[in-house]
Image: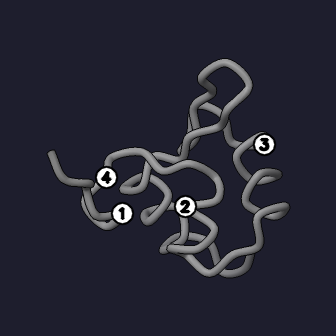
Amino acid sequence: MGRVPVAEKYTLTVPEASAYFNIGIKRMRRMAEANLGRFAIQNGNRYLIIRTKFEKFLEQTPSI
């Protein structure tokens, strides 16, 4: 069973999202904490970024 490419994943971990979107890990984690339910979910102590929702968020946000 092969690995799923990051561009095809539904949810990304904070380090994956940070590398994929070229945003620092600390900044990505803060954004996930502040936007739970909008484009981030929490699984235990881990934040997951919903890739498609985060892409829409970036399109609508002039600066991060």
Name the residue at 74% across, 25% down.
45
Q: Horizontal placement of 28 versus 21: left or right?
A: right
Residue behind mark 4: 9
Question: Considering only order in the chain, which callout, 4 or 2, is on the residue closer to the N terminus?
Answer: 4
**Residue 37, horizontal then vertical, whole percent:** 58, 31
Helix, strand or loop status at disc 2 = helix
- Residue 64 x/y as whole percent: 75, 73
Q: CA distance from mark 1 to mark 4?
A: 5 Å
Q: Amino acid at mark 3?
A: Ala
Label 1 element class: helix
Three-letter amino acid code of the residue under disc 1: Val
Q: Amino acid at mark 2?
A: Glu
Marks 2,4: beta carbons within 8 A: yes
35 or 27: nearer the viewer: 27
Whether residues under marks 1 and 4 lie with C-beta atoms below 8 angstroms apart, the answer is yes
Query: Label 1 belongs to which residue?
Result: 6
Q: Residue at x 33, y 46 (%)?
A: 10
**Count of number-bearing discs:** 4
Q: Secondary structure at mark 4?
A: loop
Q: Which mark is residue 16?
A: 2
**Amino acid at dot 4:** Lys
Q: Residue furthest front?
A: 1
Residue in the picture at 42% in, 55% down: 51
- The residue singled out by tag 3 in the image is 34
Marking on residue 41:
none
- Marks 3 and 2: which is nearer the front? 2
**Pointer 1 with pointer 2, Cβ within 8 A:** yes
Q: Residue at x 63, y 68 (%)?
A: 18
